[in-house]
Each structure stands twice: as structure tokens, then as C-alpha cells.
Amino acid sequence: HQAASVAQAASQVTGVAQVLHADDAGLAHGLAENVAAQVLAVAKSFRHILFPATDNSKNETPRAAALLDVAQISDATKVIDADTFERPIYAGNAIATVKSADAIKVITVRTTAFDAAAAEGGSAALESLAAADASGSSSFVASEIAKLDRPELTAAKIIVSGGRAMGSSEKFNEVLTPLADKLGAALGASRAAVDAGYAPNDWQVGQTGKIVAPQLYIACGISGAIQHLAGMKDSKVIVAINKDPEAPIFSVADYGLEADLFAAVPELVAAI
């Protein structure tokens, strides 16, 4: 709804051939039922319908697949051919190759696994669509938007994350916030740190949190549980600070520092 400027920007992305734009108040808040109905209205003209693997899409995509009576393919990280894709399983410890015989493939894509297309250089046709009828089965009540004074986690180029070894929310903020401020970084956390109350839930990185792939990921006091590694191992450069030399995080780190984080991180901040 009221996304004409977004549609125009999408038409300029390199590689885009056509942009379909539906504008209706029923689509204003992205209610999953209405989005799925809109997808159904245009689906028969396409062989592949792709969604980003986001929280919203996890609500929308299964509905669209069910309406089309096809099996959804989730979290694709590689395209083998028009029918065959790769996706991580077992918290990223194995890769499954899946093949679909459905005439229309409905797929969620792990966007961090692919290089972004250039935002300019394209000249796609822009077509306005009639909006599908709103389902009326749900209605928008309110939204609570978190106000951030630093980059959003999934879009950040640098992330500083803390684990259970931080010991408390006070120590988490006292030690990691100055480093994040110096680097202009987002703050992240392991599931253990979130469960312990050291960091809010929306900072959680991992298979059950957010999947990230920043240019630089600094893991402080994070042991490297499988589910955490699945959420950040595609980061371009990984730096791990941990006093346990056997911590699994070192197996994926480009640079590892075996040290007490409470001494090492302040020294790092002072040196930057």
C-alpha cells in the first residue's frame, strides 16, 4: 500500500524484467491472508514464486503454497536448476538437495546466501494490478516499532555479539556497547545470553533467531553452539574472543583470541 516509490526503485534493479504493483488499503499492514490472496491472483502466470526467509514470509509463504496446493521449499541457499535447490538442515550441519515436480514452485530464500543485485541499471516494465479482495479473517490492531540508535541486526555491516559468558545484562552493556559504538555496529546475542536475560529477544542470532552475514562478526564469550553457528557462519570475517581454547566458535573464526573478554574487549576499544 502506497508503495509506488518502492515499485519504481524495484524496476531499476539490475536483472528485473517486470514489476507488478498492487495498491490497496487491505495490503497496508501486510496481513498474511491478504498477501497470500494477492500472490494467488497472479501465480498462474509464473513458474517460481520467491519470498525472503523473514519472519513475515514464514507466515505468508505457507498460506500461498497451500492455496496453490503445492509443497513449499524453505530457506533455499543455492539454485541447482529450475526444479532443484539446496537448503540447510540439522541447524546448518548438513545441506539437503530438494527437487520439486510442482508446476509452480513456492520458495523462501535465505538472502544472505546470494550476492545482492545492483540497485540501478535496470529498466523493467512497471504494471499496476487490481488488488485481491481482503479476506476479512484478521485485522490490524497496532504495531510497536523499536527505535534503534544503531544499525538493524540483519542489515548491519558489523555485528558485536555476546554470549552467556557476559554474566549479566549490566556487564553485557558495559563491555560490548562501547565496542559497538566505536565500530558503528549492531549488537547481537547468543540464545543462551537471551534466555539468561542479558539481551532482548530481537538481538538473538542463530537458527531460532536471526540469520546474519555481515562484513565483520565479533563473537565475545560465545561458545559456538550449533544453532548459533547456523545463524552467522556466512559472515565475511568472523572474530572470536573466548578464554576456552576448545570453544567450537574457533572452528569457524577467521581470527581467534584466547583471552578473558572482560580484559580484551576494553583494550580493543582503547586501541581503535
Image: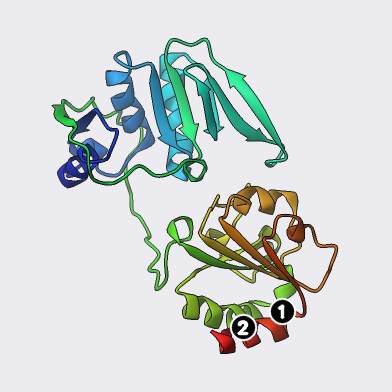
List x then y, in percent, for residue 45.
29, 14
Task: Assign a secondary structure to mark 1.
Answer: helix
Horizontally, residue 139 falls left or right of residue 172, namely left
> What residue sits 50% from the left and 46% below the top?
112
> Which amino acid does the dot numbered 1 rest on?
Leu
Horizontally, residue 160 falls left or right of residue 185, namely right
Horizontally, residue 129 falls left or right of residue 80, namely left
Q: Nearer the viewer, residue 35 or 73?
A: 73
Q: Nearer the viewer, residue 249 or 161?
A: 249
Which quarter of the figure has residue 260? bottom right
**On residue 268, which mark appears?**
2
> Which amino acid does the dot numbered 2 rest on?
Leu
> What residue sits 35% from the left and 42% below the top?
117
Please report contact status of discs 1 and 2: CB closer than 8 Å, yes or no. no
Which quarter of the figure has residue 94? top right
> What residue sits 48% from the left and 60% below the top?
153
Q: Work out which residue is located at the far bottom of the displayed protein and give it.
A: 270
**On residue 81, which mark appears?**
none
**On residue 261, which mark appears?**
1
List x then y, in percent, for residue 255.
68, 66
Quadrant for the N terminus in the image: top left
